[in-house]
Amino acid sequence: MRKILMIGGTGTISTAIVKQLAEEGLWEVTVLNRGNRADILPQNVRQLVVDIDDEVRVRELTGDTRWDVVAEFIGFVPSQVERDVRLFAGRTDQYVYISSASAYHKPCKSYLITEGTTLANPYWQYSRDKIACEEYLMKEYRENGFPVTIVRPSHTYDERNIPIGVHGKKGPWQVIDRIRQGKPVIIPGDGTSLWTLTFNRDFAYGYVGLLGNPHAIGEAVQITGDETLNWNLIYGAVAQALGVELHAVHVPSDFLAEVGARFGYDYAGELLGDKAESVVFDNRKLKRLSPGMKTTVPFDEGVRIALDYILAHPEQQKPDPDFDAFTEKVIAAMEAAKAQVTPA
């Protein structure tokens, strides 16, 4: 049986992959993390509880094991992937790194994104760090044969998290609750920019097809679903699933970026560097490498799965009074601006 070591393993993306691998029974799955959310792991999954930055302890726990795949889900800056190369060079046949589709050139020169689209994002440090990680890993592949596969997800969600364009630091619940109560909510721009959402179970289908696949070594592959929506449709689907009418206030993204910074919100990165751009992903490369990839959970179904879960689990309902107050101020400012524009 082939062996996979997953660094992380209990996040939005990795949880679905762990479950699929455990159900298929073709891989011996080990997750390496700090032990959070251990209760969600399938019984046939082994867990190594350790801080991945403690390299001495990681070497003690992993011994001389050679892995068919090492999968990195929590590498965000170059020093973290440099650490992984130190730990696993010569000990794995494939190293799969989760990057981000936000690394693609912003502003977009073309709405259609392929793996060959230039990587450049002047708005978001998160994305620039991912680009730097990719560059380091590909250099290691070219010069030293380190067997990397780079995966670029876009907006992937699960039952605990409904995709929202603008929310506060505690997640989307405050926006969901405003929609539920019939209060106005902010939609960035005019709401017509195109966006791709992928349920984590669908992402897992594409990802698993890359594991142990020799054609994926030295390649970057984007994994997204095939359904493209705009933000008006996304928010509208949330309201429809809640059985209420949506009251949307459209606010320019550059306005949100500037005023949001005064309240500690990085909307320059999250909007101008990502969500405000129209993107459609060309997934032909993914489907050549992982033919089983397809969208099985469209958003109108996924949002109902997520709402059912969130409404049944109070711990997922995190009030955010600061973002609520910010929303009210932004909407009031937009209304005041409209009122000031009158004929001479």
Image (tube, rainbow, N blue to C red):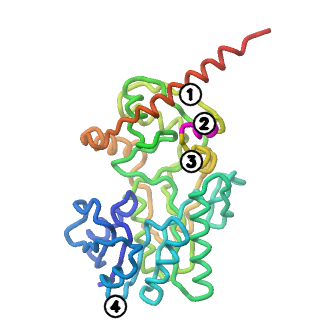
Q: Which residue is mark 1?
A: 330
Camera-side residue: 206 or 217?
A: 217
Say if 313 sits above or below 22 in the image: above
Q: CA distance from mark 4 to mark 1?
A: 57 Å
Q: Earlier in the sequence, mark 3 or mark 2?
A: 2
Q: CA distance from mark 3 to mark 2?
A: 10 Å
**Local SS, label 2:** helix
Amino acid type of the residue tagged 3 in the rendering: Glu
Q: Which residue is mark 3?
A: 270
- Residue in view at x 69 percent, y 15 percent: 340
Does the magenta stretch mainly form a helix, a strand or a loop? helix
Residue that lies at the very extreme toward the right in this rendered image:
344
- Residue in view at x 44 percent, y 86 percent: 93
**Local SS, label 4:** loop
Which mark, residue 64?
4
Say if 74 sits above or below 212 in the image: above
Are dots 1 and 2 in contact, CB under 8 Å?
yes
